[in-house]
Image (spheres, rainbow, N blue to C red):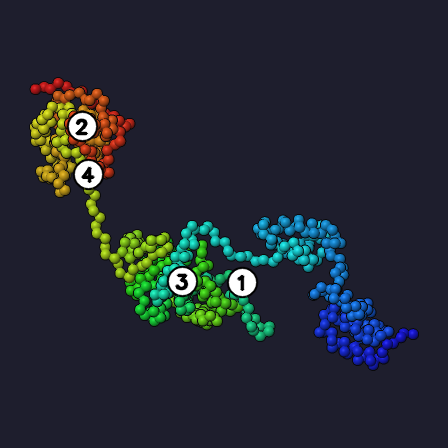
């Protein structure tokens, strides 16, 4: 016969009381509470409480022991309901090789820095559990997750922090931009951050994010994102006013070109900028180094010059270093909030996109306006080189620090630079200095006398050559050059021939002495030789110097020893060769026959 501690009616009342208390107690509190009720009932209370609560008598007895022993009750650490070591043993304890097999499997798909305390795997938990099952080790995906967390693994996404190659003046450019923005804001000049936002397709296309809607009534969009032939793509271009915390976005339906970017800045200035800054004379624009506002784009500078002329503003442009576009303020001050407004909302028309941008506000006071631009902006527009030269010479003012990144577009062109000075005429050694017996090998006065005798023949030959080239036209008498330099006459022709025959100078050296090219020196010596042949003239010349001059220094030393103040001309157009015996230029003085008087 079973001993009953309480009646059935009292047991029912106890069951009702326990049911009320159960939701408010954790496992340990529930167990101790059952034990206190059992101790209060006395003998047979454990069985009665077990029947009323539905718990096992073992649980009620354990609670009674904990309730009666305060020291044992406080032995459990905070947050624990059971003593350590209770429950089933872990899978790694039952299967000793499980952890080693898991480590080997994870090593094959391991990612991360080898010295970092955190790592991650490209395998899913179920894939890892399946691979272990093939090896004869059984464990659930939850066990795999627990073991991986103990080994330092965690679930991680990708972090977009790598910037590629880092320019050596990256930080200096950031400091330069920051300082210039502070100066412009303090002076009351407008400072804007500009950039083009990601292009968007119009239509029932999926967009990330979730929105509150009636249950079972999601927004229905296409199952794929492939555009149709008639799908329209919009290109938003944003302008963020840094000082006023105001955004402006021009939504275009054509190409995102530099002309469209400048058109967006023009629209912002006409609608907001000129009203907000009525006394401004300068506009500071910060932008990326690439895209439609690239620092290498010719069309960008050309259109900014047009805008500067229209508004009368000095447009100062400062580009961020390459690969640092995420630091542009418009990215995290305007575009991120526009994207949030567009979440879970298909852009059916361009007007929907404009309305979504205009509805963008933040708790920090950001307000946005938007406009639509249906203008046509063709791609591939080329700016001629003459236009760029005009911009560089008259309108673009490069900064002293990285002028390719920091420059200003002037509203009015600078004064045109004066004409470049004409290059100086080739210099030459005076004729009287070259007409010396030591250089010509002829007695003093003979070459001048010979030149006077050959003057008529020389002029006749020139007239014949001129008529041969120009028909029946007659050559006008030779006159001095406009610069005052004396033209080559018959004396110069004879001097060129004697410098070649007596000193063995190459044609390049003779041309430098007479202020002509080596090719002209060849023609001059040939004509002089023909004059002597036609007139059957022979010359009585002294033998050449025993060591003929081989360098310009040797020539000057030879002339100085003969008492000739010879100074070689500093001519960069027809330079004097460094050596007079180069390959192909060796000349042997001709033998001069005895004169036939």
Q: Earlier in the sequence, mark 4 or mark 3?
A: 3
Left or right: 385 as drawn, with respect to 68: left
Closer to us: 544 or 450 = 544
Mark 4 or mark 2, which has the lower sequence index? 4
Whole-percent x, y for residue 468 in the image: 14, 35
Report how far apart the C-alphas of labels 3 and 2 lie in the structure: 72 Å
Q: CA distance from mark 4 to mark 2?
A: 24 Å
Give the residue displayed 55% in from the left and 68% down from the top: 210
Seen as rendered, the residue at the extreme right is 1
Q: Quadrant of the N terminus?
A: bottom right
Looking at marks 2 and 1 on the same chain, the residue that comes earlier in the sequence is marked by 1
In which quadrant of the rendered image does the C terminus lie? Answer: top left
Reading the chain from its start, which is encountered first: label 3 or label 2? 3
Label 4 crowd bin: few (<14), some (14–19), many (20+), radius 10 Å: many
Q: Nearer the viewer, mark 1 or mark 3?
A: 3
Q: Label 1, label 3: how many angstroms apart (C-alpha)?
A: 32 Å
Q: Residue furthest bottom?
A: 9
Q: Which mark is residue 194?
A: 3
Residue 295: image x %, image y %?
37, 55
Q: Secondary structure at mark 1?
A: loop
Label 3: few (<14), some (14–19) or many (≥20) C-alpha neighbours in 10 Å? many
Q: Earlier in the sequence, mark 4 or mark 1?
A: 1
Tell me where residue 439 appears, x and y as whole percent: 16, 26
Mark nearer the viewer, 3 or 2: 2
Q: CA distance from mark 4 to mark 1?
A: 76 Å
Q: Residue at x 68, y 55 (%)?
A: 147
Q: Which residue corresponds to mark 4?
A: 426
Q: How many C-alpha atoms fall within 10 Å of the one at disc 1: few (<14), some, or many (≥20)?
A: few
Residue picked out by circle 1: 224
Disc 2 designates what residue? 560
Badge 3 marks a residue whose secondary structure is strand
């Amino acid at each position: 016969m079973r001993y009953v501690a309480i009646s059935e009616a009292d047991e029912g009342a106890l069951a009702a009381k326990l049911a009320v208390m159960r939701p408010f107690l954790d496992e340990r509190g529930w167990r101790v509470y059952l034990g206190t009720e059992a101790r209060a009932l006395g003998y047979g209370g454990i069985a009665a409480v077990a029947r009323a609560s539905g718990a096992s008598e073992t649980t009620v007895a354990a609670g009674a022991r904990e309730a009666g022993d305060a020291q044992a009750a406080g032995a459990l650490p905070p947050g624990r309901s059971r003593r350590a070591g209770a429950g089933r043993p872990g899978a790694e304890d039952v299967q000793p090789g499980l952890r080693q097999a898991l480590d080997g499997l994870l090593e094959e798909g391991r990612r991360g820095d080898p010295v970092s305390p955190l790592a991650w795997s490209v395998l899913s938990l179920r894939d890892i559990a399946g691979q272990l099952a093939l090896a004869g080790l059984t464990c659930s995906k939850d066990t795999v997750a627990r073991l991986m967390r103990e080994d330092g693994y965690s679930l991680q996404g990708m972090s977009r922090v790598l910037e590629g190659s880092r320019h050596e003046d990256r930080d200096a450019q950031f400091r330069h931009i920051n300082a210039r923005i502070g100066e412009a804001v303090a002076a009351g000049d407008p400072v804007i951050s500009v950039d083009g936002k990601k292009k968007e397709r119009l239509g029932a296309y999926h967009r990330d994010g979730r929105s509150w809607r009636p249950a079972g009534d999601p927004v229905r969009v296409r199952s794929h994102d492939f555009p149709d032939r008639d799908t329209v793509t919009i290109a938003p271009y944003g302008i963020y006013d840094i000082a006023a915390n105001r955004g402006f976005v021009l939504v275009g339906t054509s190409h995102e070109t530099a002309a469209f970017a400048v058109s967006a800045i023009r629209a912002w200035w006409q609608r907001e900028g000129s009203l907000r800054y009525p006394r401004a004379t300068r506009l500071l624009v910060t932008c990326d180094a690439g895209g439609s506002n690239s620092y290498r784009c010719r069309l960008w500078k050309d259109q900014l010059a047009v805008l500067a002329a229209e508004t009368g503003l000095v447009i100062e442009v400062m580009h961020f270093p390459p690969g640092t576009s995420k630091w542009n303020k418009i990215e995290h001050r305007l575009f991120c909030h526009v994207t949030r407004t567009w979440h879970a909302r298909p852009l059916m028309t361009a007007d929907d996109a404009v309305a979504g941008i205009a509805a963008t506000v933040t708790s920090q006071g950001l307000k946005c306006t938007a406009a639509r631009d249906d203008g046509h902006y063709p791609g591939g527009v080329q700016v001629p080189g003459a236009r760029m030269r005009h911009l560089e010479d008259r309108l673009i003012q490069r900064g002293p620090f990285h002028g390719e990144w920091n420059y200003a577009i002037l509203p009015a062109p600078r004064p045109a630079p004066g004409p470049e000075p004409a290059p100086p005429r080739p210099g030459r050694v005076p004729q009287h200095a070259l007409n010396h017996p030591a250089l010509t090998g002829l007695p003093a006065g003979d070459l001048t006398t010979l030149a006077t005798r050959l003057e008529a023949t020389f002029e006749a030959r020139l007239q014949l050559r001129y008529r041969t080239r120009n028909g029946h036209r007659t050559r006008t008498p030779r006159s001095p050059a406009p610069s005052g330099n004396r033209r080559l006459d018959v004396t110069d022709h004879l001097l060129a021939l004697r410098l070649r025959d007596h000193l063995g100078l190459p044609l390049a050296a003779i041309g430098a002495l007479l202020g002509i090219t080596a090719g002209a020196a060849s023609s001059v010596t040939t004509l002089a030789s023909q004059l002597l042949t036609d007139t059957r003239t022979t010359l009585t010349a002294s033998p050449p110097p025993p060591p003929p001059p081989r360098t310009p220094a040797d020539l000057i030393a030879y002339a100085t020893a003969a008492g000739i103040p010879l100074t070689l001309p500093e001519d960069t157009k027809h330079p004097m060769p460094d050596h007079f015996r180069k390959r192909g230029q060796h000349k042997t003085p001709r033998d001069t026959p005895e004169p036939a008087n």
